[in-house]
Image: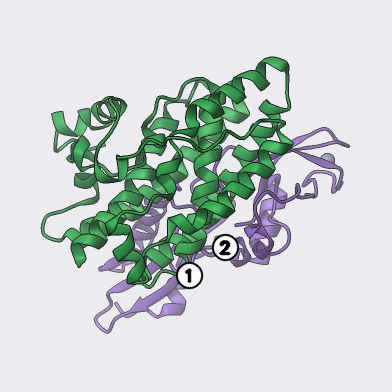
Chain colours: A purple, B green
Amino acid sequence: MVVTEAQIWDWLAEVKDPEIPVLTVQDLGIAREVLVKEEGAVTVKITPTYSGCPAMNEIEQNIRQKLEAEGVEKVQVETILSPPWTTDWMSAEGRRKLKEYGIAPPEGSSADKKTLFGTEKKVTCPHCDSRNTKMVSQFGSTACKSLYQCQDCREPFDYFKCL
Amino acid sequence: MENDKLEYVLRLGDNALILGQRLSAWCGYGPVLEQDIALSNIALDQLGQARMLMQYAAELKGGEATEDGMAFFRDVFDYHNLLLLELENGHWGDTVVRQFLFDTFNYFFYTELLQSADERLQSIAQKAIKEVTYHAQWSAEWVIRLGDGTEESHQKAQKSLNDLWEWTGEMFTMDELERRMVEQGIGVDVAALKTRWDDKVAEILDLATLQKPEDDWMQSGGKQGEHTEYLGYVLAEMQHLPRMYPDAQW
Ligand SMILES: [Zn+2]
């Protein structure tokens, strides 16, 4: 079977993140590069969000399964570290889906995250759009999220923090 | 000297692995759910960084060497982590203060490692610095909270700080291996980090109303493989399963 890189990208757009199932690996910008060799062997290069992200093995497996199910015979998934993943790579569509799911999407650019002991970030509540929110904990249910609470609607929510 | 590089990478990997293993023991025991989760996440980041470094070390070693082999089949004297990181967790304040002292060092360390002439270390640093920045913020905030908290939390945090201080000197002592690595542009001149570390630590301790201890006699030896009695216990627990069942699969 002859596949094109565009076709592979379309299939990757259907592979979901195991921890935030509304997002695909494409929304997250985890898949960085697709290479199709002449005889049909496919290499997908992925980059971890966090170095200890426990979902990476599953994501790798899911990509492999998806492509094999579509008839690609030789699938290789390679992990690359550089350039490091940043929330800037999350697509606009991904951000919209996150908010709808109840997780506040990363705000602003990741560039300002490199300062040590910075001031607390103001985040918009994904439920009522209030800016009157407060960080409860730097680390939420997974390393990529912080836990916030809205002071207006009182709902707690996860914030996908900038990296 | 590829052997130099291998040992250097292992030192960094061992720091991340031993601290990650120590912090993992807090999982389920944190004082409140949010902080239990925070510390578990920090532990996970450390283990992730350890994996990147051990994978690299295994490649440098070549032959049959693997990431798991590096972690599970080396003995105490082949470990090169800082002594500070193998100490017992103690109470919450001890763990928080140790984390703060190391995170602050680690932040400045990885900031410098971004400039390494070794491309692989450079990419590992790019990844690690983002995570370490969050760790350093978290532990600094907790030092302030405990120091500037109740009378009891203040006293306990001050005692943790006094007790741990003698273990901080090793972070900034250069040995021959580190000098050679710095000469080649690969490693970090840790002695040069001391002033920045002192300033940042002083700033946070001031906010925490804690007294910065005087530099006095310092413990050393971890980087060269001379450890406290505690490391043996850490390794025994961590290595027991793969040594008992070398082909165990999840
Ligand atoms: Zn709200």
Residue A30 appears in the rendering: no
Q: Is residue B139 left or right of residue A147?
A: left
Assign a secondary structure to mark 1: loop
Q: Is residue B18 left or right of residue A162?
A: left
Q: Is residue B17 left or right of residue B194?
A: left
Closest to the observer, A45 or A1: A45
Task: Find disc 1 in the rendering and name its residue.
Answer: A83
Q: Residue at x 36, y 77 (%)?
A: A35
Q: Where residue A86 is drawn, which disc sits there?
A: 2
Q: Residue at x 86, y 48 (%)?
A: A131
Q: Residue furthest left?
A: B63
Closest to the observer, B218 or B53: B218
| Discs 2, 1: same chain | yes
Tell me: residue A97, above or below residue A93. Answer: above
- For disc 2, the neighbor class at 10 Å (few under 14, some 14 to 19, many from 20) is many
Amino acid type for the residue under numbered disc 1: Pro
